[in-house]
Amino acid sequence: MDLAGQLRELRALAGNPSYRTLERLIDRQGRRQRMARSTIQEKMSGASAVRLPQVLAVVEALAEYARLNDAPLPKREIDPDVWRDRVVAASKRTAGRDSEKISSSNRVSPTRAIKWNLDPLHQAQMDDLVDLIRESHANPVADWFPRVLRAMMEAEMALTDFIEKAAEDSPQGVISTVKALEEEFPYWLGDDDNPWGGRRNEENEMTVGALIRSAAKRHGDTASPAIIVGLRRSRVGYHVPDFLTRVATWFLAPEIEKASTHLRVAALGKDAGALFASVGESRQADRIFEVVSHLQHKGKADDAGLVLKAIGGKNVYRLRAIMADFEKRQAPENWLMEIARGVKYENRSECIQKFEEWEDGNLVALLRRAAEEPPF
């Protein structure tokens, strides 16, 4: 019987509590990661892989439900070590099936190609993690990576090298790992006393956020559509803006143009526009001109316009630095005018006042001309 079947059998033995009841009991356990009813149902039906922390949470909830109903479960059936062995056995069966599939199709697993640096784990005598990684060489990174990062985080070890290595996986592999990390390190920490409150989980930023950034550097110029669509289909699309921002700030102009072309071919024109806007909003002040110049040279004036208009959306000090750089490079006046048009209506007075203080008459004139134009 597979692992999901064993969990269903234990649920029946406990009296078939509802998924809502299990959700509530798991919440009471005080674990870092909560499990929604839909997630519990998905795991117990076998629709997705069940990881050890989830198994232990469900088993503990079933044991508590049985106790509350004066029908305690046999100790062996709720023993964490027993379930840990069952999870390991299930992982080995999955690994065997995956290895057979790889051999029969004569393909090499992307995971096997990653050369993990195990020296930090050796030095810290974290032999359990070393063994886990070695035994999981044929498994998807997503199956074991969250456990390794959790242990390293608890030991206050740097995660950067491991996360950058995980980004070497295929785009599909990266997405699977992002999804697994999102379950272990949820994006949002809710507030039980205030359902509208909560905050971004710092652990999510350290793990998922870091992997998104590394994936952008690794795959952004060639596989942006696959990453973006994968994030959205995994219901973690809120990471897409961060991914696009990293592509916009790290790559050279030709690669950014290449990424935008891939996005448009994949019917992701809105994301291509967001990519160019991110260049204007977030790229280093003295590295925006090169992108605009490249796009203009390639006859993509509309895309260059998206970059220019986005520049004015940030603070006035950054606006001054960018416009000064454009003037130094002898940018055409119509480029500067596009930047001026991009300044938001509610910020124009402040911008004009600041540029007057800085005695930059040419830019003050451009801002005044833009302010006098009709808003359509």
Image (cartoon, rainbow, N blue to C red):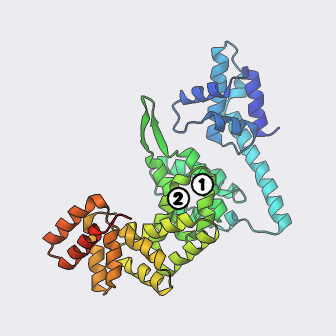
Camera-side residue of 28 and 53? 28
**Mark 1 element type:** helix
Furthest-right residue in this view: 104
Q: Quadrant of the N terminus?
A: top right
Determine whether label 2 and label 1 are within 8 Å by CB: yes
**Mark 2 element type:** helix
Q: Position of residue 320 (x, y in %)?
A: 25, 72
Q: Position of residue 205 (x, y in %)?
A: 46, 53
Residue at mark 1: 232
* Residue type, mark 1 in image: Arg
* Residue type, mark 2 in image: Val
Q: Which mark is residue 342?
A: none
Q: Residue at x 66, y 61 (%)?
A: 172
Residue 287 as seen in the image, left or right of residue 56? left
Q: Residue at x 71, y 56 (%)?
A: 139
Which of pointers 2 and 1 lies earlier in the amino acid sequence?
1
- Work out whether residue 252 can be spotted: no
Residue at mark 2: 240
Camera-side residue of 60 and 327? 327
Q: Residue at x 17, y 66 (%)?
A: 353
- Work out whether residue 54 can be spotted: yes
Residue 89 as seen in the image, left or right of residue 315? right
Q: Position of residue 242 (x, y in %)?
A: 47, 60
Q: Position of residue 136 (x, y in %)?
A: 69, 55
Q: Residue at x 67, y 63 (%)?
A: 111
Residue 242 as seen in the image, left or right of residue 82? left
Q: CA distance from mark 2 to mark 1?
A: 8 Å
